[in-house]
Image: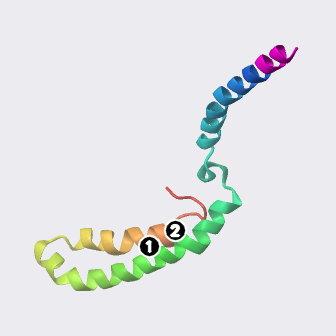
Amino acid sequence: MKKITFYALLTILIFGIAVTPGYCQDMEKKSYKATGRAEAYIIDLLVTRPIGIAAFGLGCAGLIATAPFAMMSGSGQQAFDAFIREPAEYTFVRPLGQFD
């Protein structure tokens, strides 16, 4: 009787170990970006947006520093897009909780 119980428990343990990675992989596909959970909003509001505001400020300073060189080379619009437009869109236009 003890042998049968031992083998039954061993079989259940082996199947449990084999099924767990498949379950975890399925759960990984459902990220917070797709579900819109509250954690995504909190991370976005408390971490990502302040970093975006700082990047926007640094971008303004960077554009001022590189503007003469960008204008001489004819890449003023590219510099504006890289230093100002992209950080501004990421910080102020992007919906809350979406990290695309």
Colour setup of the view = rainbow
Q: Quadrant of residue 38?
A: bottom right
Q: Quadrant of residue 14?
A: top right
Q: Is residue 78 above or below residue 53?
A: above
Q: Is residue 61 left or right of residue 53?
A: left
| Chief secondary structure of the magenta portion | helix
Task: Write down the region rendered in magenta.
Answer: 1-8
- Amino acid identity at mark 2: Val
Give the residue pinned by disc 2: 93
Q: Nearer the viewer, residue 44 or 2?
A: 2
Q: State the mark number for residue 79.
A: none
- Whether pointer 2 and pointer 1 mark residues with C-beta atoms closer than 8 Å, the reply is yes
Q: Position of residue 4 (x, y in %)?
A: 82, 14
In the image, what residue occupies the spot 18% across and 70% down? 75
Q: Secondary structure at mark 2?
A: helix
Q: Secondary structure at mark 1?
A: helix
Q: State the mark number for residue 88.
A: 1
In the image, what residue occupies the spot 60% across and 65% down? 96
In the image, what residue occupies the spot 31% across and 85% down? 61
In the image, what residue occupies the spot 25% across and 68% down? 78
Q: Nearer the viewer, residue 77 or 36?
A: 36
Q: Nearer the viewer, residue 27 or 90?
A: 27
Q: Residues within 10 Å of mark 1 (few under 14, many from 20)?
A: some
Q: Is residue 56 above or below residue 81?
A: below
Q: Position of residue 79 (x, y in %)?
A: 25, 72
- Amino acid identity at mark 1: Ala
Which circle's residue, 2 or 1, is located before the other in the chain? Answer: 1
Q: Position of residue 62 (x, y in %)?
A: 28, 81
- Locate the N terminus by quadrant: top right
Q: Is residue 84 left or right of residue 53?
A: left
Q: Position of residue 22 (x, y in %)?
A: 62, 31
